[in-house]
Amino acid sequence: MKPEADRSGHSASEIQADRRGATPPGEDASSSGFTVDAFHNGGFFLVQPEGSGHRAGMDAMLLAATVPESARGLLADLGAGAGAAGLAAAARLPDLEVVLIERASVMADCARRTLQLAENAHLAARARVIEADVALQGDRRRAAGLEDCRYDYVIMNPPFNSGRDRKTPDPLKSEAHAMEFGDLFERWLRTASAILKPGGQVSLIARPESLSDILIAMGKRFGGAEITPICPRPGDDAIRILVTAIKGSRARLGLRDRILIHEGAGNDFSTQMNDLANGRTAWPRRVKTRSSK
């Protein structure tokens, strides 16, 4: 099969997490147009469309790594797709419950099927799916199940490409990759602020050119932003940024050391990236969040 391209145009074979394409017993995904893919070295599995939509990889695993080892309580994965980032956090953190919020019916159904896999039984009791638009406001958002001040953590991997960059004829993949609105980060961070508890942590991954829009959208809602560049190799420009911040904080912004995807000329992950992608380590904030109660 030809490797999928991620949102930056890099091939999945170059920057995806450990996704072996294994099909657990009892799940004949290939015959129905879906695959069942292993993450965290088989720590959990994900049902994904075989030939359409965005297939999870490095971005989701890095996003999950921003949730600290001490995390407990409730996490919302906004725009969850098949649930890769939220379930990666849950797989690493046994005291964390996750809610996977996804607008596209096909991807929300993938997330439900994912939770039904026997191999994910250790996660299913701590995860559920809400099919809803992240950008809903007020009573409509609350009616969809996204209650005010309910969550301890929010993670998000928005469709951060410009609509001008949309090239794929696949509508499901286009929806996952490209912004529909110029104020996308405002819409998503508004929801994150509404549903987070005071002192709760938001994390997102995006392209570096989105940084100014992200910081403007955070405004007075969030503070203490910590920004980590993600670079393919030494000397390369960043292709992603990880951003975390705290609801209601007035702490200063911080720029952290980079994460290198590769150490040499080949496509193997660096030791650090391999550990982050497979749930063996985390990328917690320098300034710790408050402990969940």
Image: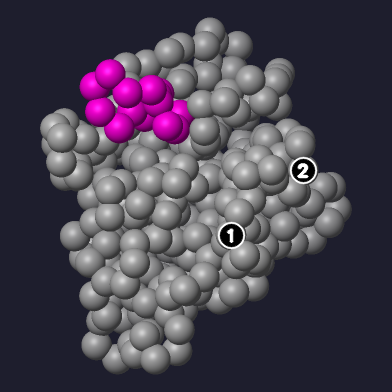
**Disc assigned to residue 181:** 2
Q: What residue sits right under mark 1 in the picture? A: 168
Look at 46% across and 20% down and name the residue there. 226
Q: Amino acid at mark 2?
A: Phe
Highlighted range, magenta: 228-241
**Disc assigned to residue 68:** none
> Where in the figure is residue 44, as x and y percent of width and height?
29, 65
The answer to which of marks 2 and 1 sits earlier in the sequence is 1
> In this view of the protein, which residue sits in the foreground, 97 or 229?
229
Left or right: 283, with 85 as reference point: left
> In this view of the protein, which residue sits in the foreground, 7 or 188?
7
Instruction: Please determine whether, in this image, residue 111 is positioned above or below residue 30.
Output: above
Quadrant, the N terminus? bottom left
Left or right: 288, with 189 as reference point: left
Q: Amino acid at mark 1?
A: Thr
Look at 43% across and 80% down and name the residue there. 34
- The CA span between labels 2 and 1 is 18 Å
Look at 19% across and 60% down and name the residue there. 41
